[in-house]
Amino acid sequence: MRTTRVTVAALVAATALTLTACDGGTPAKTDGVTQITGQSKAGTATVLDRPFDKPELVLTDTAGKPWNLREQTQGKPTLIYFGYTNCPDVCPLTMSNIAVARKALPKADQENLRVVFVTTDPERDTPESLGAWLKAQDPSFIGLTGDFATIQAAARRLGIGIDPAKKETDGSVVSMHGAQVIAFSPKSNEGYLLYGENTTVDTYTKDLPKIIKGENP
């Protein structure tokens, strides 16, 4: 397979496709979004040239308690995704794919893995509603909500653009967001792999055992 260079422009294009699939709206703004470069092959993760530092991010978990991303995932293989519970397709499919792949891991690895879902629609995604939604996906998944500006700033540092939720003319409310999953290594605590919205269960199932060890897939 041909290896390609992935830049922020390519990722913005992928985001636009995700947003179109979700709600038919316009892409999220990318002002201030961190530049991304890396190596990828078709249907695989992008291995980032410059891994992301894990952002300083303290939000509210589904129990209504403060949750510190850096402290709670220190030394743990971690997947992070920004989305919202009212998304009709991409968000639930992404989380479902990860849930299926996680269940294929040995029990100890399942318990070690952290999967963090950060809402892009905190006004509607309360701790209670977020918890109920994630429980249907996988009870181990961690849901975080809080101040939108804080969430947006953290997402931008990870190369993901999101916009505030807005009401459409038909009365529906949509949240525009990038649809990438970022994997953080338990060895360095850096985000070193990026998965697009079309990543399959098979890819996650194949890659998770290596992510658990902090290896490249």
Image: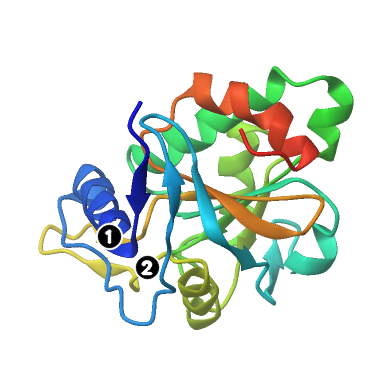
Disc assigned to residue 56: none
CA gap between label 2 and label 1 equals: 8 Å
Residue at 40% x, 43% y: name it. Answer: 196
- Whether residue 139 is visible, yes or no, is no
Q: Residue extending furthest right?
A: 108
Residue underneath mark 1? 12
Disc 1 secondary structure class: helix
Residue underneath mark 2? 161
Residue at 76% x, 45% y: name it. Answer: 77
Residue type at the position of mark 2: Gly
Depth order, front residue of 41/63: 41
Labels 2 & 1 near each other (Cβ < 8 A):
yes
78 relative to 198 in the view: left or right: right
Which quadrant: the N terminus? top left
**Other residues around mark 2 within 10 Å, as few (<14) / some (14–19) / many (≥20):** many
Between disc 2 and disc 1, whose residue precedes?
A: 1
Disc 2 secondary structure class: loop
Q: Is residue 19 above or below residue 145?
A: above
* Location of residue 14 in the rendering, given as x and y in whole percent from the top left corner: 27, 49
**Other residues around mark 1 within 10 Å, as few (<14) / some (14–19) / many (≥20):** many
Which quadrant: the C terminus? top right
* Location of residue 193 in the rendering, given as x and y in whole percent from the top left corner: 56, 48
Residue at 80% x, 57% y: name it. Answer: 73
* Location of residue 194 in the rendering, given as x and y in whole percent from the top left corner: 50, 48
Q: Is residue 130 above or below residue 90?
A: below
Rendered image coloring scheme: rainbow
Residue at 33% x, 32% y: name it. Answer: 2
Q: Is residue 124 above or below residue 115?
A: below
Residue type at the position of mark 1: Val
